[in-house]
Image (cartoon, rainbow, N blue to C red):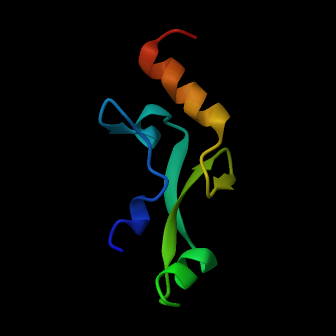
Amino acid sequence: MDQIKQSNGILFNGKPIEAILPEAKVAENHCQSCCEFTGNAETFCRTLEVDGIVHEAIPAALIRQATCEVAQCC
């Protein structure tokens, strides 16, 4: 249960996506589905905010963008 706050973390060569994308910020939000998973305990999950949009699941476009930054190919 301690790892729920890392639930949608993505690492590139050991660095989190928010370290690759400087405009990205990590936050948390109340997660009802995880509350049910943990037996109705108050649960907060990791989110990623980019350009004012909060993502509960990291979109493929952001993963591609970070991959291109790391690989220096785009």
Residue 51's place in the image compared with 29, above or below, is above
**Residue 59, percent from left and from top:** 65, 42
In this rendering, position of residue 53 left or right of residue 28: right
**Residue 3, percent from left and from top:** 35, 65
Residue 50's place in the image compared with 64, above or below, is below
Q: How many marks?
A: 0
Q: Residue at x 58, y 11 (%)?
A: 74
Q: Residue at x 51, y 28 (%)?
A: 66
**Residue 57, percent from left and from top:** 61, 53
The residue at the far top in this view is: 73
Residue 29's place in the image compared with 71, above or below, is below
**Residue 33, percent from left and from top:** 61, 76
Residue 43's place in the image compared with 24, above or below, is below
User: In which quadrant is the N terminus drawn?
Assistant: bottom left
Q: Residue at x 62, y 58 (%)?
A: 56
The residue at the far bottom in this view is: 40
Q: Which image quarter: residue 12? A: top left
Q: Residue at x 46, y 83 (%)?
A: 38
Q: Which image quarter: residue 61? A: top right
